Image: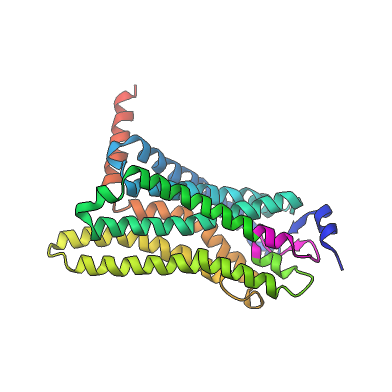
Amino acid sequence: MRSFNTTFKDGFILLGFSDWPQMELFLFVSISIFYSLTLLGNTSIIALCRLDPRLHTPMYFFLSHLYFLDLCFTTTTVPQLLINLQGKDRTITYWGCLAQLYIYLALGSTQCVLLVVMAFDRYAAVCRPLHYTTIMHSQLCHALAISSWVGGFMNSLIQTCLMMAMPLCGHHLNHFFCEMPVFLKLACEETGGTEAKMFVVRVIVVALPAVLILASYAHIVQAVLKVKSMSGRRKAFGTCGSHLMVVVLFYGSIIYTYLQPINSYSEKKGKFVALFYTIVAPILNPLIYTLRNKDVKGALWKVVRRARDLGP
């Protein structure tokens, strides 16, 4: 039986998708394309939100944080995955794995809280339109954003410390990055107590925000249905529907991974679910928010025209 100390010295081997060697080339090409598009799309929209004064609103302020989170989210895992898929080096040091686990958990937790903040912003915009600018003032927006980041990193610190206290047997992780459910599978002893503590933390960070978001959207729907103008209804449902779609995509995969008993967790299915919320979702988020968004389209065309006018 391998002890935690031996694992500490040797690091870990990420098995990745070695069970499906015939898929590795396809995954390498697909993930490389998705990652490049994610970097381009998210960076471009963050730049637009900074450059165009019309996008200097609380909604786009929080969206910039969301897109930055997506950039960090993918960069935490994808470079390691691409190396893994080439089959040249499937190892990761203990401290590298620990850092990846901590950062990944922190970013995921931050996004959970940030989506609640964005739901509150939409609630204020739809249900309290006359007082919206007074409620969502600059100081509050910055305080909410900072609280999201601090809360996310504090949650990650708690869970990472709980994981470090567990003795682990073996150093093969059946995943393409260091994720908590896979570590729990390596535990040498009964992890019921640790799992219970982690579950409480996850309920607070995942389930509670989901309930708050649903509650805010219940009030939003009630308010929108009272609007007599059909164009006003469409605009409200369009903006809020985009946010709700992002919430469903993110929380659906996160709840599957983190809120089910560890003995029910399938490592094979978990890898493909993780692919979705680390690679697919970050590229979908900008598309969901911007395809039907006139403000972003207008800002984009403005930048394009300016670049064309300055060109030779």
- Taking the view exactly as shown, the residue that stands out farthest to the left is 228
Q: Position of residue 272 (x, y in %)?
A: 58, 65
Q: Which residue lies furthest to the right in this view?
A: 1
| Viewer-nearest residue: 71 or 167 | 167
The structure's colour scheme is rainbow
Viewport quadrant of the C terminus? top left
Q: Residue at horizontal 76%, vertical 57%? A: 13
Tell me the residue at 36%/63% (across/down).
244
SS majority, magenta? loop
Count of labels shown? Answer: 0
Residue numbers of the magenta segment: 160-180
Which residue occupies the foreground of this view, 42 or 141? 141
Q: Nearer the viewer, residue 272 or 24?
A: 272
What residue appears at the point 78 percent right and 54 percent down from the top-left corner?
11
Q: In this view, does 306 lie above or below 49?
A: above
Q: Where residue 82 appears, x then y in whole percent? A: 64, 51
- Does residue 89 show up? no
Left or right placement of residue 32 versus residue 123 in this view: right
Q: Quadrant of residue 298?
A: top left
Residue 274: within the magenta? no
The residue lying at 81 percent from left, 66 percent from top is: 169
Outermost residue on the bottom side: it is 264
Residue 164 sits inside the magenta stretch: yes
Q: Image quadrant for the N terminus?
A: bottom right
Q: In the rendering, at what x and y percent does residue 19 appear?
A: 70, 66
Compared with residue 259, is residue 17 higher up or lower down, i.e. above or below? above
From the top left corner, tell me how far across and down residue 178 is, in percent.
67, 58
Q: Quadrant of residue 182?
A: bottom right
Q: Above or below — where is 225 with respect to 136?
A: below
**Does the image show residue 110?**
yes
